[in-house]
Structures are given as structure tokens and as C-alpha cells.
Amino acid sequence: MSRSTFFLLSLGLAFWISRGAAAADPAASPFDPTEATIGDLQARMASGSLTARELTQAYLERIREFDRAGPKLDAVIELNPDALAIADRLDAERRAGHVRGPLHGIPVLLKDNIGTADRMQTTAGSLALVGARPPHDAALVARLRGAGAVILGKTNLSEWANFRSGTATGGWSGRGGQTLNPYALDRDPSGSSAGSAVAVAASLCAFAIGTETDGSIVSPASTCGIVGLKPTVGLVSRTGIIPISVSQDTAGPMARTVRDEAIILGALSGTDPEDPATRSRPAGLPLDFLSALKPRALVGARIGVVRNAFNLNRAMAAILDQDVVALRAAGAVVVDPVDIPNQDKIGDPEGVVLTYEFRVGMRAWFASLAPSAPVHSLAQVIAFDRAHESQEMPFFGQEGFENIEATAPVSDKAYLDALALSRKLSRDDGIDAAMNRERLDALVAITGGPACVIDHVNGDSNQGSSSSLAAVAGYPSITVPGGQVFGLPVGISFFGRAWSEATLLGLAADFEDHTHARQPPGYLARAPVP
């Protein structure tokens, strides 16, 4: 047995011994929030058997046990020093007969690129941004506060939302270190919303918010065995989020059940005068997504199976096959396969679009910072990283940033041509064409492969992802647990036309009810591979 394996096994034994000691003392853990849903928690608070303060304290204790010690997941990058005070105010409101809604008193963790104008930092995991506080809450944060959620803290992420380097490791940042996958501690949690996914999987919060440009919600949700929703671009405001791409960026909910996703999405959605994309939402689009969760939603639904998103290995193909069987058993009409041509051609124009929009978006974001902020340009971030190389670049570099800074800006025409081509390939010739041709209600695909081993030498080594079609199109996608490979979760994604969240949530919830594929994490030292 290697020294590292012995250490991890010893750590796991000590962790479970400490858990047993805590369980023996009822006063040490008055409420166990493990796997609790938003509905469970609201029912307890409504009955008077639980307060928001007690719930917040329970999550803080769990973070101390699992994130700071125990398996030491390193999912939470910072805790809100005002969380308990917020919970107290919400408890006072409840006692006075005022309940704001289903999120009243429910703790949430936010990805550390989502701005909060409080005593926490917003850094995208970069030490260069420590002290660069945003002037206002992100619009979605304001909506969560208004809905009564308790902002519990911030989660770690792949630094700069995985845009700094092409050889980055999922879930690593200079400020937060390496987040671990709770199913096997030697495995990558994927990114960039790694900390949010791990925190939800490990019940460090009731729910979390992630962000996605291409795969950054659905990929870590898949590898961490939870539900992750990337909404249509414009359903949730991006104001106050550190940007990459105005045409692809969105925030979205991450939770353990589809029902919780529907509750959270209703609170997040709405127009924002500072985000023009939110004005594209169709008039009359319902925002009560809970009403979409009807029993037997799959009965008669036409579902297309996309198998050419990437090459499926035997284990992944087996999971997709068993999920197709489940869809048919639930009453769906399955069209298998549905080929979408030219998927392999999306990457090049997408790269042009992201580079152009990142330049423009970051220039505006830096301008929004106070004059006292430590950096005000990408060039200053690059210089900071070089000056702090041992902290910021011990494993991988910043060639993505350096290439953007060193090369001439993409011309407006080249950008507009690339944007038009991206949308044609992903929309007109992609999702829309396939759904129209086969008269489909949704498409499904394996979200991605099981978690790879953490490798700080070579970076991530994954088996592909089906995220790009919906991401480049700006269309919605939801991943739900679809199975496991040697104890490592694999998700299945439901995706479709713009603004079809209600349909996708209903189908995903019915699939979830039929399969019950989610298994809580075991915090193993490594995956049980023979």
C-alpha cells in the first residue's frame, strides 16, 4: 500500500469515527440536513420544529466537518459572516406571520464569480481579485435575498471559470485550492462550477448557484451526482457576474432533485433592465416552474437520443441504453438515434466568439470596480500571476489570457460571422432542425464521462461532453443522475428549444421518479475499480 493511499484510508477512518462520536451526542448535531430537500426543510420550519438559524448552523457545522476537516472537500471558498444574522431576521419575519415563499430561510451557496456587495469577496478564485469588491449585488443575488434565501457563502471553482488555461484541473483555483469529488476523493469534480456541485452533493447547503458558458453547470453536476440546470440565455440575469461570453453565459440552479430546481429557477427568473438578454423572454412565459412537474409527463412525449455528441465507451453506452429503456418504460416515444450533423464544427467559431466577447465583457467589468481595486485590466492580472507564480501557477499556466492579450482583437466582421455560424450550426442545423424533423419534445444525451483522476501534471482527461450544442445555441439543458460507473456518477441531459425549461423540467422529474438513480456520496479514498 502506498503512503498516499494509507493516508487517505486513515483519514476516512478518522472521519467516520468522529461522525460516530458526534452522533452519540444529540446536542452536537441538533438537526442533520443530509439529503434534505427544500420541501422537507420548509415543512419543518412551518411546523416550528426547525428555525432558519438552526438550519444555517447545521450547514455551518457540516461544512466544518466535511469541508474543512473530515474528507476536506474544499468546496466552500468563503463563509458569510452575516449568515446567522440573516437567518435570525428571517425567523423574526416568520414569527410575525410573513413568509416570503418556498426559499424563506433556506441557505444557499454561490459560485465565487457571482458578485455580492457584502463582507464576502468575489474573486473567480483568483488571488489577483482579492479586495476587488463589486459595487452591487448581482441581480440574481438580489432576487435570492428578496425570496428569503440565506446567503451562506461562496464556493470554489475552476479559476476564472476555466478560461485561463487549456490544461487546467477542474475545481482548482489559486485562492481555493483543489476541490475534491465526494464520491472518490482522488477524482476530479469537473468544472467550472465544481464547488457548487460538490457542496450540493455533500449536503453542505440546501442548493447552490453555478454559472455556465459551455458545460460549467452540467458537467460538474453530472460527475457529482446531482441535478444541474443551464437555462436559456436571458431567463436569468447575468448582471454582476464576472463575464466570459454575453451570448453564452448564464447562471443556473444546482440541487439534489428536479423539484428543488424548479423552485429555485422560479426565484431566479425575471427581467433586468441592465441585462438586455432578459428582454428577449417571450411575453407570458410562465415562471412558476413547479406547475410543470406533472405526473406521467413522459407518457407520449417524443424523445430523441443523441449518440454522436462524442464517442461513448462501453460503460457510458450501457448507461445510456438503460436510460433509454427507462424512458420507454415510462411511456415515452423514443427516437434512437437522432443524428445532429456538424457538431464537430462548432468549436472553431465558438472559440472566436468567446475570445471577442471576453475582451469586451472584461473591459466593462474591470471598469465597474472601485479605483481602489488591486487590478483594473487583464494585463494587470497576468502581471500579478507572474509575480505570484508559486501560488497562482503551480500546476498550469495562463496561456489563454496571454494569447488574448498578445494577439490583435478579433475584427467585428470576423466575430459577427463566427456568431452567425455558431448559431446556424447549433440552432438552425442543430437542435431546431432535429426536433422539427422528428417532431420531438426534447433531446437526450449522456452529459459526460465519469470523473477522471485529479492530474495536476497533465490537466483534465475526460471523455467528452454533450454540453456544446445547448451552450452555443443559448438553449436550456438539464442534467439528472443517469447511472454510475464503478461508483462514479454519470448524468443524462435533457435539452431542447429556447425557453422550453418547463417542458424539460417536467420530463426530467418524471425520469427521476422512475429511475431514482441518484446515490449519496460515500467519500471513498478512491473509486472501487477492480
Image (cartoon, rainbow, N blue to C red):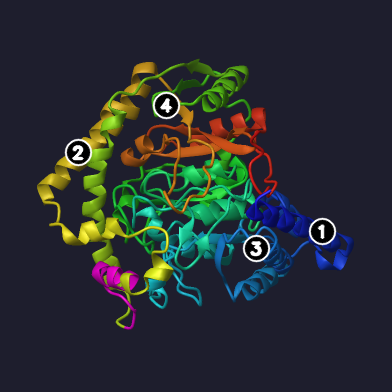
Q: Position of residue 279 (x, y in %)?
A: 32, 50
**Residue at disc 2, secondary structure:** helix
At 50% from the left edge and 74% from the top edge, which residue is drawn?
A: 120
Report the Cα–Cα distance between label 4 and label 2: 27 Å
Residue 312, placed above or below residue 415:
above
Residue 360, placed above or below residue 27:
above
Q: Are marks 1 and 2 in contact (CB under 8 Å)?
A: no
Q: Three-letter amino acid code at disc 2?
A: Ala
Q: Position of residue 416 (x, y in %)?
A: 16, 45
Q: Which residue is mark 3?
A: 105
Q: Earlier in the sequence, mark 4 or mark 1?
A: 1
**Residue at disc 4, secondary structure:** loop
In front: mark 4 or mark 2?
4
Which of the 4 image quarters holds residue 442? top left
Q: Are marks 1 and 3 in contact (CB under 8 Å)?
A: no
Q: Which residues, given as a range, are shown in magenta?
A: 372-385
Report the Cα–Cα distance between label 1 and label 2: 58 Å
Q: Which residue is mark 4?
A: 311
* Quadrant of image for the C terminus: top right
Report the Cα–Cα distance between label 3 and label 2: 44 Å
